Amino acid sequence: MSFGAPEMLWSLLLLPLALFGYVARRRSATRYALRFTGVPALKLAAAAAPRWRRHVPAALLLAALAALGLALAKPGRSVAVAVDRATIVVVTDHSRSMLATDVDPDRLTAAKDAAHTFLSQLPSVVQVGVVTFSDAPDQVLAPTRSRGDARAVIDQQEADGATATGDALQVALDLINRTGKPGHRPPAAIVLLSDGATTTGVDPIGVAGVARRAHVPIYTVSLGTGEGVVPNPGLGPPIVVQPDPASLRKISQVSGGRAFTAQDSGRLSAIYRSLGSRFGQRKVRHETTAAFAVAGLVLLLGAAASSVRWVARLP
């Protein structure tokens, strides 16, 4: 729960003072109470009421004041609602290290399958763009609602080349910027899947900073394990291709996104499924001031009614 006017919460400090005043008044009333000698006769004349009833009006009044104090602070809560429009650009690495078979059947095939899962989770109103890269961005699809076009670009990838992550992110950011001005543009995000550190091109951390200023978070997914190897183009032994989750985590942190790590195809699909659901919703603040105000008024009426009904008076 959040508050639109949190400074009004200071009014709740009056509640302990009110409680202290009530206790002091009760003690004062007991001190100066009249003493009757015919107590048995009084008990027969008036049915004895439970002691707790005398405190009910005060308790309801304090609860009413608390509810009204919270209402003054304009409470609200965030609820998830379906997006009416958004833009997502999927950036996929198909460098030579994606040939590694530490992820079944291999990293690139697992990445393609997970991307299809991601697309199936997105609402139809969300526009999807695709950027694939190795030495440089080579396949670019502008944001579209056609899932078939997006799947076709993803399926055309073949593992080879180096890793130009920064160049690919810049292309993705340019695609998003073309969808409208920052102040009037639909919500947008980039999803980056890669298994290694940048080996060529511009620094991706700098691009992540630009993305943050444009309010475009980058969600990174690091794919692979430390046991991944690829064939050596020469005659030497296989080359170890370890993932670099630290670099991808830095990209997500700088841009305001989140970082994920996947060491098998099942985990990768689960991450993409979760991201698809995340981008299909947005958080909206729903103010609950009226509910607290109504509760306060009901409690006030309860305090008044119980005071008339239960508080004892001498005839």
Image: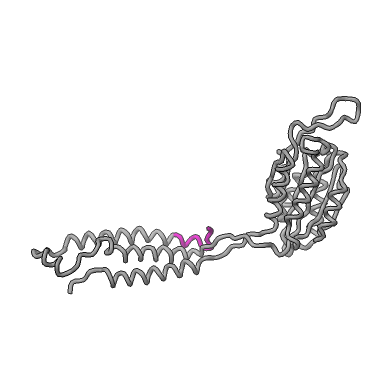
Frontmost residue, 112 versus 283: 112
Frontmost residue, 312 versus 170: 312
Q: Is residue 127 visible?
A: yes
Whole-percent x, y for residue 297 in the image: 41, 71
Which span of residues is magenta-colored?
1-9
Based on the displayed image, in which of its 4 quarters is residue 95 positioned? Answer: top right
Colouring of the image: one colour
Based on the displayed image, in which of its 4 quarters is residue 224 positioned? Answer: top right
Residue at the extreme left of the image, as rendered: 37
Residue drawn at (54%, 62%), measured in percent from left and top? 76
Whole-percent x, y for residue 287 in the image: 55, 65
Frontmost residue, 267 versus 127: 267
Whole-percent x, y for residue 293 in the image: 46, 69
Frontmost residue, 312 versus 121: 121
Residue at the extreme bottom of the image, as rendered: 315
Residue drawn at (69%, 45%), measured in percent from left and top? 259
Horizontal side of residue 35 vs 264, given as left or right: left
Q: Which image quarter holds the C terminus?
A: bottom left
Against 220, is 292 above or below? below
Horizontal side of residue 97 vs 183, given as left or right: right
Q: Is residue 200 visible?
A: no
Residue at the extreme right of the image, as rendered: 234
Assess whether residue 50 is covered by the magenta stretch. no
Residue drawn at (52%, 61%), measured in percent from left and top? 3
Assess whether residue 5 is covered by the magenta stretch. yes
Against 310, is 16 above or below? above
